[in-house]
Image (cartoon, coloured by chain):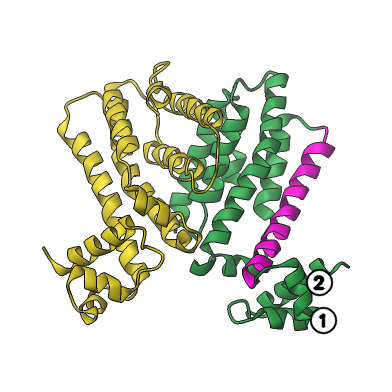
Chain colours: A yellow, B green
Amino acid sequence: MDKKELILNAMQELLREEKGATCSVSDIARRAGIGKGSIYYYFKSKDEIFDAVVERTYSQIIDKCKVIVEKSQLDSISKLMLLFQSYITSTVESSIDEYLHQQFNASIHQKSLAEILTSLSPIIAEIFQQGVEEGIFKCEYTLEVSEIILSVFTFLLDPGIFSWNKEEKKRKLEALSLILERSLMAPKGSFDFFIRDF
Amino acid sequence: MDKKELILNAMQELLREEKGATCSVSDIARRAGIGKGSIYYYFKSKDEIFDAVVERTYSQIIDKCKVIVEKSQLDSISKLMLLFQSYITSTVESSIDEYLHQQFNASIHQKSLAEILTSLSPIIAEIFQQGVEEGIFKCEYTLEVSEIILSVFTFLLDPGIFSWNKEEKKRKLEALSLILERSLMAPKGSFDFFIRDF
């Protein structure tokens, strides 16, 4: 394993032990079994290490989504359903998620939301485009529609930013499935799985 | 003027002079012409003072929007147009905006975005509802649709989070006007003003 991975694993372990807020770069070095100087060769600060831990976590989720889209020979709506299920069941480890939602990490949090949006939107747009070619969707703004839908998932539905109750969340997902259906001029009920599976 | 206002004005002045990052609570007290102890009676920290400056700024914008909606006897689409124009021309003072977009203020920034969304969405939903009663819109999720649209304005179109070029921004607004038109089942071209006026 390369040193960078060792450092990220060490921080992730410390987070699991709830030492995220208190651990220092020295603690991370000790846990990784390498010198403090080596860490500074890769990362400028503890914040940068955490940033990389978050990025690695989200990359794994996005890679999983990519595999689904590329592998399957399914029609567009089934692909979207699979992607949605994969996304909502890819739980970010709770120790990382909690630390990410601490006030002092707001900047890393915001950056990570933006990264998910920019990485996932072309993948979803490609499936929308497939639907257009299948003749079941009608839309000239597939990339933009997927960005708008992802803004809702990453921002409006982020429990660290808003605290909606169950009923409010349900209504937002119903609205989202309706908006997507009407925006893509898709068959009625195409996105009912938003509500069923959430 | 009450002391709280004096404190906020003092910090706003220091921001204008680009002393936001360096000024201390003592500096703010000196500028406000009051004792440092008095400040701590109202605010716990410099961050809290800045938070209140931001909140005051956004409240003024939202109040302006409310006045438009309550005063005018216009139909729903004209009201939405006025509201949109008022929102995009309400420039947050650039000194406040720049400081707000500093990394270390990400948490206050995020909170302010959430506040705009929750304050503005019922106002917009009311106009959508008026449109439903006028018989030009058809939608059972007026509040949720306005929250979704506002997620795009506050998050996806925030220049501090994403850096879209002019063409990308234009396409997002075109998509947004199309999505809103289809979501509300509004007459074709109802929201062309998004693109015209931005």
Q: What element carries label 1?
A: loop
Determine if marks 1 and 2 fall on one subunit: yes
At horizontal 66% and vertical 21% (from top left) the residue drawn is: B136
Q: Neighbour class for label 1 at 10 Å: few (<14), some, many (≥20)?
A: few
The answer for which chain carries disc 1 is B
Q: Mark 1 points at which residue?
A: B33
On the picture, is A14 further left or further right than A21? left
Q: Neighbour class for label 2 at 10 Å: few (<14), some, many (≥20)?
A: some
The answer for which chain carries disc 2 is B
Q: Does residue B67 show up magenta in the picture?
A: yes
Q: Disc 1 to disc 2, how far (Cα)?
A: 8 Å
Of residues A147 and A68, the one drawn nearer to the viewer in this rendering: A68
Residue A53 placed where, x, y %? 29, 59
**Occupied quadrant, residue A55:** bottom left
Residue B161 placed where, x, y %? 47, 58
Label 1 with label 2: CB-CB less than 8 Å: yes
On the picture, is B52 further left or further right than B110? right
At horizontal 61% and vertical 65% (from top left) the residue drawn is: B97
Residue B169 placed where, x, y %? 48, 50
Total labels drawn = 2
* Mark carried by residue A154: none
Q: Which quadrant of the figure contains the C terminus of chain A?
A: top left
At horizontal 30% and vertical 62% (from top left) the residue drawn is: A14
Q: Give the range drawn in magenta.
A: B46-73
Question: Would you say residue B24 is visible in this rendering?
Answer: yes
Q: Mark 2 points at which residue?
A: B6
The answer to whether A3 is drawn above or below residue B113 in the figure is below
